[in-house]
Image: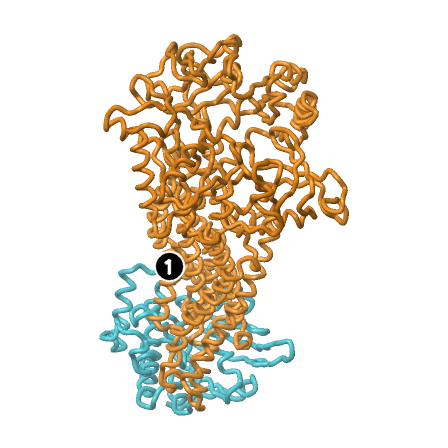
Amino acid sequence: MIKVTNLSKVFRTEEIETTALNGVSFEIKDGEFVAIMGPSGCGKSTLLNILGLLDSPSGGSYELLGTEMSGMKERERTHFRKGNIGFVFQSFNLIDELNIYDNIELPLRYLNIGAAERRQRVTDIMKRMSISHRAKHYPQQLSGGQQQRVAIARALVANPKLILADEPTGNLDSKNGREVMTLLTELNADGTTIIMVTHSPKDAAVAQRTINLFDGQIVSDVKNEL
Amino acid sequence: MNFFRKGKTTRAAFIINTLGMGVAIAAFYILAVQVHFMFTYNKNLPDHENIYVMHVPRFSGEGRMTSISRPLAERLISELPEIAAGGEFGPWGSSWRSYSLQAEGEHGSAENGFPRNMSTQFTFVTKPTIEILGYEFIQGSWAAMEGDDRHLAISESMAKKFDLQVGDIIQENADGGKRMCEVVAIFKDVPKNTDIEHFDVLCDIGNVCIDSWGEGSFTYFVKPAIGLTTEDLDRAADARLRRAWTEGGFFPEWYGSVESDEELEKVMEMVNVKFIPIADLYFSQIGGNYIRRGNKGMAYGWVAIALLILLVAIINYVNMFFALVPIKIRGINTRKILGSSRASLTMSVVLEAVTMTAVSIAVAAALILLLQTTTYAGLMASSVSIVRNAGVALLCAVGAIVVAVGSSLYPALYITSFEPAFALKANFGASQTGKTLRYALVIVQFTVAIAFIIMTILVDIQNRFLLKHDMGFDRENIVVAHVSNKVGNETTTVESALKQNPQVKDVAWGDGWLVSWGRMSWGRQIDGNQCQWEVYPCSWNMLDFLGIEIVEGRNFTQSDTQTETGVMIFNETARNQYGFTPGKMVGGHTDKDAEIVGICKDFNAWPMSQAVRPYCFYVWGDQNKWRPCTELFVRTTASADIREVFKHIEQTVMGFDEKLTTEDINVHLFDNDLQQLYDDVKRFAKVTRMLSIITIIIALLGVFGLVLFETEYRRKEIGIRRVNGATIADVLRMFNRRYAIIVLACFGIAAPISYVVIVTYLQQFAYRTAIHWWVFVLALLAVMAVTVIIVTLRSLRAATCNPVESLRTE
């Protein structure tokens, strides 16, 4: 599904040049659950953003679903992202102005899916995430765990082939964190490819494979014993 | 200044709001000066509460005027114990006269840069008027002026400008010719903002027209006996005049007498004399020779506009302070945690507003100074100079500070009202109440802007309509000049001389302006009916010259000038109103009746705000001609070189009277005369246009500021949307849709309001333009287009920003 070869990312300002990723190469197969670990500033989130087509690499190659992504224009990346990739963030990133239903429905609107189908899909995913009763609530009215469930529901509603999760349990207590990890494991069991950035060895242990980054380079890529 | 330490958005908001408020304060000040000028007019005169002006019905029967005959006024003053004193003030004939130095002497010299000539206003006065109006003599006295119209009293400023003193001789140039006069008194300049302020030269009227009951051209000021009111004076005059009609011995015999109560009421309607305090004259709609009139509706309109402009600017302020809440709240509450009191924090926010307003006041002052150097300053009824209007300026500045404190106090109290722990965590950018308030305020701004655009366009259309509307005669290629009586007595010869230039197609003569607010009116008792009409003495070819069609009877012929009483041609309105037909004899300018020889098509001899009234062209006969026609009308060929024609007219006319100067002749295009009649309307249109532009700019600055903050606060949302598949176009559409809905809602409010206002405005005109539907659509499209441009440009940056950056900032 994903083939990354010699990927690099350099951030330049007037005064300083920072290399966030330096010659990163790996492959991820369909249906895999991969955890990316490493200390702060090692390039985990940068890598995730590039994989999620939110950012473009400075060099190297990135193939997603057999298509080369590096060098793609912003409009093309947006087009490719829609429906193929779902995102789950540490800070949930829900829109405060929209209620839970509308937040979840958002990706479907940008995919120009008809109203009836949207309603059906949102209702289904809310039921699956056990948040149906919260449809009319606003994000501020929900607990952190519930907000993350909504964020996962929104990531899943368009049936993406790939879920990118950036420290999904980072803002949650241990109970809610466990629940989210259970949800991700179930999704993966259903066939969804998941790439998760985490600081938590416990969460990483849930994944089938862990890539360790340090100073923008892969220092280890190991299969986990489940 | 804190604003400059809080990032680009805050800085931009500060600049936008300061400029907006500066423009608003400047506009408010200018309007306040105008309104102050209007409401204090004539109130600067000493003891103005006890100065009254006499007024009588107009000859035409419509409205009233201060022009009264001397014997009528003098008899009432002398006979009514209710009047303590009364006297005349006003020119007889032209008030504008030019004065020039003749002899080089110790004074009145042209040395040291003093001018040799000046043109200023002259007026006759009586001794009581000098006392009533509070004139103070610096040199000389009334005694020196009395009984000699060559003995002049001049103003202090004229004396200074001319370097004149009592005893100096100056030459006066007026319609009647030139004469040598002596300066016998110098009076202190009279207060500004009064009807008498422009008269620099006073002269004793003596017995001019003292027995002319038919010459109602004089303005009388009176002082009532102590403690009496307007009603007392009116009642006293009414009682005396009723007695005059029933008992006799007051009016001349040729006035006739009344036989019944019904007749008494009828004549009393025509000659009743009333009084008005001089302070109320300006807004009274009572006309007069030099009496300046103001429109109270317009004054209130300007007050409303001024307040709306200020409101729009205040809204920007309130919006900005609320928009700043999320930026400020963390810092303020951190200070709170560190020990600062709520009062001092509130004060710091209010002080920021006061500082901003101080900068705005400086911007306003700069704008006002700038305005004074432009032609727009001439549009105002009074000077906008800050020095001359220091009181109003101070009031505006203090008012602006008070408004700033007021509009910042609530946000200041709000921002400091939270528990620090809550405030440090909460996201106030998304606060629903704050957003609703901001949008509500912007709705007011948009509504005002749209309504102003609609009204401005329609006022402009009406203005153009008035100037371009078919007046019922051919007004193309007409040049007008003013000549002396000497030239007016040789019209045939002058005409031949003028026509030697092939660019001159035709020549005609009239008495005064062809189109004007009013002219000589005659009232006659005909077949038992009281008939009133306006009279325009003219040359026999005038109707042909103007292309006015005769609908009944015949046109004038050259032989009409040889008749004993002269002949008349009335317009259709006179025929329809009074049943005049060709062949009928009606009272002319002699004791004998004159014949109506024809009826002409109605045309507009008045500004287009007025309807057609009974009107009469009169060709004098060969006897008892009052005065020659001195208004020269020349129709040129369409391709004529106007400058050359102007020169030809000047040279020809001066060839017949070598005393005339080019200034005396004042050759100009007829269209210029028409334009002057619409000065008020044009001024109102221009001022409205200027104010509309200001309001629209301020309102759009407000929208710009709002979008600026909104894009800032919604960066995270934009990022989330982008991550979830929104394209740049989707984001732009999202922002624009919201503002488009606001604009549409505001249009829904503004359209009916502006419709009602414009219908009310148009009611003052007899001829009105249609209220075109496309004006409303145009206003909507204009505001929508500007809004879309602003919103798109501002949102584009947020929309194209890398979503990762937006999410990272959170």
Task: Name the tint of chain B in the rendering.
Answer: orange
Q: How was the colour assigned to the protein in this rendering?
A: by chain
Measured from the top left, where is residue B64 in percent x and y? Answer: 38, 36
Q: Is residue A7 visible?
A: yes
Foreground of the two, B644 or A44:
B644
Q: Residue at x 58, y 50 (%)?
A: B137
Measured from the top left, where is residue A163 in percent x and y? Answer: 40, 75
Q: Is residue B789 visible?
A: no
Location of residue B238 (image quadrant): top left
Judging by colour alone, the chain drawn in cyan in this rendered image is A
Quarter of the picture containing the N terminus of chain B is bottom right
Instruction: Answer left or right for A123 relative to B55.
Output: left
Foreground of the two, B773 or B737:
B773
Label 1 neighbourhood size at 10 Å, few (<14), some (14-19), many (20+)?
A: many
Q: Residue at x 37, y 80 (%)?
A: B426
Measured from the top left, where is residue B93 in percent x and y? Answer: 54, 32
Mark 1: which secondary structure? Answer: helix
The correct choice, above or below, for B141 with respect to B573 in the image is: below
Quarter of the picture containing the C terminus of chain B is bottom left
> In this figure, which residue is indicated by the disc labeled 1?
B443
Foreground of the two, B469 or A57:
B469
The correct choice, above or below, for A72 with respect to B256 in the image is: below
Foreground of the two, B536 or A219:
B536
Instruction: Answer left or right for B289 relative to A178.
Output: right
